[in-house]
Amino acid sequence: MTVKKGKLMMLALTASLSAAGLWGCRGEAAYLTGGQAQSAEESGTEETSEDEIAAGGTSEEETDGFGTTADLAFAGETSQEETQLTESIQVTGSSDRSAPSGMALYRSSLFIWNEEEWSLELYVPEEALADGELMLDDLCPFQIRAVSPDRAYVLFDDSVQLGTPAGDVWTDEEGRLHIVIRDVRTALYRITEFVYDGEQDGFEGQAVIDREGINYWGTVTGQ
């Protein structure tokens, strides 16, 4: 029987590869690696069964990478922190514009907005003032509020340890009223921006920076 020339060449190539150990089957017995045929048991590699693939199983390399359960949990925590940071603070006004009980006006800044006179006021405990000078304890209550001709809006009301809150007021290019509260104290640095909403007759605030566990060293100012 005559064998075609092409078949003879294929048989010769197969024999050569088998002799050199470069031809391996892709079944359960062995696979090709570095010119040596190794069994799955010898190589320490476990094959993934069809059932595992169908169930959506993952290899160790995949579970040790970016998509691990720990990574997903960390991403969830970051998302929650961002959500908490962007939660809005609603401040409604009060017709009672008198000084808070037991507190005295320490500093105020007058400004004109919408052709009306407003003021940004900082209150401290009466006993903390001596001849107009502030005598701070380690822990001191403060209140900051914006006051219009007929209403008062409390933007900050808290006791501060080793720190003094401050407020800045300004209007943007669209004429909207902004008040920024800077709360810097022991292990805390928080900046909250409030914008006046005329339709709601109140302020809506948002924490721009809210960091805990910081080491505050001080402030430099030209005033």
Image: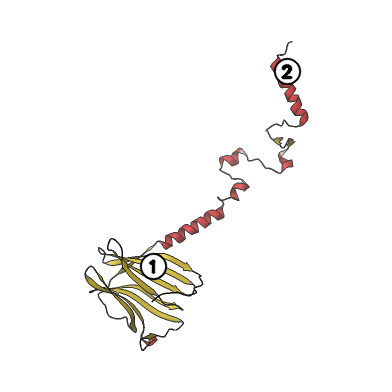
Q: Left or right: 140 with respect to 65?
A: left
Q: Are marks 1 and 2 in contact (CB under 8 Å)?
A: no
Q: Left or right: 85 with respect to 204?
A: right
Q: Position of residue 214 (x, y in %)?
A: 50, 70
Q: Name the residue located 42 percent from the left edge and 63 percent from the top edge.
A: 85
The residue identified by callout 2 is 8
Amino acid identity at mark 2: Leu
The residue at the far front in this view is 222
The residue at the far top in this view is 1
Q: Position of residue 124 (x, y in %)?
A: 37, 81
Q: Left or right: 68 with respect to 149?
A: right
Amino acid identity at mark 1: Thr
Q: Quadrant of the N terminus?
A: top right
Q: Name the residue located 34 percent from the left edge and 83 percent from the top edge.
A: 103
The image quarter containing residue 45 is top right
The residue identified by callout 1 is 192
